[in-house]
Image: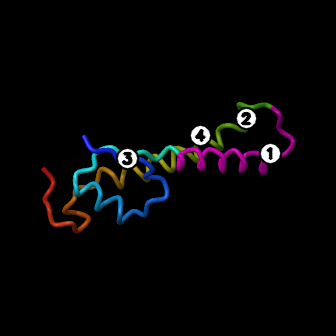
Amino acid sequence: MLTLHGGSGTNDDDLRKAIAAGINIVHINTELRVAWRRGLEEGLVKRPDEVVPYKILPFAVESVKRVVQSRLQLFNKPQDAVGLGQTAR
């Protein structure tokens, strides 16, 4: 198994190339933490007087979900579909 540590902030094309080259684990923890923070901030802006955590946290959860969905789509595309020459098996 080959792991790309520090995958957060890596552009999509470079991630595709890394996966095509054999990387099969990509760490994107910082990217998820940033999404969580931005979602939380969005919730606080949209509900400035709210003090109940379970009414604010869904903004953070949705923000993280969007990043996860986006990254899973990128990571799971067949390599031939992204123009890297090798066919998916």
Q: Of the residues shown, which amino acid type is indicated by label 4?
A: Val
Closer to the N terminus: mark 2 or mark 4? 2
Visual colour scheme: rainbow
Closer to the N terminus: mark 1 or mark 3? 3
Q: Residue at x 80, y 45 (%)?
A: 47
| Residue 54, horizontal then vertical, whole percent | 71, 31
Marks 2/1 in contact by CB < 8 Å: the verdict is: yes
CA separation in Å, label 4 and label 1:
16 Å
Q: Of the residues shown, which amino acid type is indicated by label 1?
A: Arg
Marks 4/3 in contact by CB < 8 Å: the verdict is: no
CA separation in Å, label 2 and label 1:
9 Å
Q: Secondary structure at mark 2?
A: helix
Circle 1 residue: 47
Q: Please give left or right for residue 41 compared with residue 33 in the image.
A: right
Q: Of the residues shown, which amino acid type is indicated by label 2?
A: Lys
CA separation in Å, label 2 and label 4:
11 Å
Q: Of the residues shown, which amino acid type is indicated by label 3?
A: Val
Circle 3 residue: 26
